[in-house]
């Protein structure tokens, strides 16, 4: 049985002003604004939106983002702390969820005595946004540090891309 968007009342806001969720405080309303609390809930929301034919827009920390005043039709799915925000250190590798703030990843690296991320200090947003935008500066970019990325495909399957 296909779920309805109404099945997500606990995490759903209708016509939510996106200006409340962007750093520049600009942007009209999202038709549906959802904040999943767990990965299974996120996957369920995405599957439901696909079945209903709703456009899906992913929102992280809202930095480096301009939203038109007319707003956004479809579902805006906010993926930020605490969902997808785990950070683990395994040897000299940092494994971070896409919703983790980049500043938190850098702090955890420093706490673990790992170097090489210093040039990312001061860049706002989430790790996923940094990877998608290949954030960085004169000293280098995040793409030089990433060895693999786990993504959700259009079919709702997980896939790993690595070097």
Image: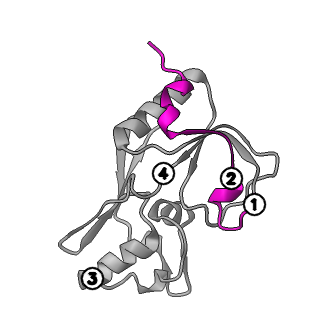
Crowding near the residue tagged with mark 4, few <14, some 14–19, many ≥20 C-alpha atoms within 10 Å: many
Residue 70: give x, y in percent of width and height.
Answer: 82, 45
Label 2 close to label 1 by CB (< 8 Å): yes
Look at mark 4 in the image and give the residue it sits on. 79
- Mark 2 or mark 4: name the one nearer the start of the chain: 2
User: Image quarter for residue 144?
Assistant: bottom left
Lateral position of residue 76 relative to residue 109, left or right:
right
Label 4 close to label 1 by CB (< 8 Å): no
Residue 59: give x, y in percent of width and height.
Answer: 57, 52
User: Image quarter for residue 37?
Assistant: top left
Look at mark 2 in the image and give the residue it sits on. 18
**Which colouring convention does the figure follow?**
one colour
Q: CA distance from mark 2 to mark 4?
A: 14 Å
Does the magenta-highlighted stretch encompass residue 21?
A: yes
Q: CA distance from mark 3 to mark 2?
A: 34 Å
Q: Which mark is residue 111?
A: 3
- Mark 4 or mark 1: name the one nearer the start of the chain: 1
Q: Which mark is residue 26?
A: 1
- In magenta, the rendered stretch is 1-26
In terms of secondary structure, where does tag 2 sit?
A: helix
In terms of secondary structure, where does tag 3 sit?
A: helix
């Amino acid at each position: 049985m296909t779920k309805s968007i109404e099945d997500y009342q606990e995490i759903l806001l209708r016509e939510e002003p996106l200006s409340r969720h962007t750093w520049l405080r600009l942007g009209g309303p999202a038709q549906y604004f959802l904040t999943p609390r767990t990965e299974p809930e996120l996957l369920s929301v995405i599957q439901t939106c696909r079945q209903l034919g709703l456009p899906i827009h992913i929102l992280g920390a809202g930095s480096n983002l301009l939203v038109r005043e007319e707003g956004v039709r479809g579902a805006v799915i906010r993926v930020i702390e605490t969902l997808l925000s785990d950070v683990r250190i395994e040897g000299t590798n940092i494994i971070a969820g896409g919703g983790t703030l980049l500043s938190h990843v850098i702090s955890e690296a420093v706490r673990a005595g790992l170097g090489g991320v210093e040039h990312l200090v001061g860049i706002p947003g989430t790790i996923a946004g940094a990877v998608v935008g290949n954030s960085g500066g004169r000293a280098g970019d995040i793409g030089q540090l990433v060895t693999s990325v786990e993504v959700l495909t259009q079919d709702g399957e997980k896939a790993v891309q690595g070097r």
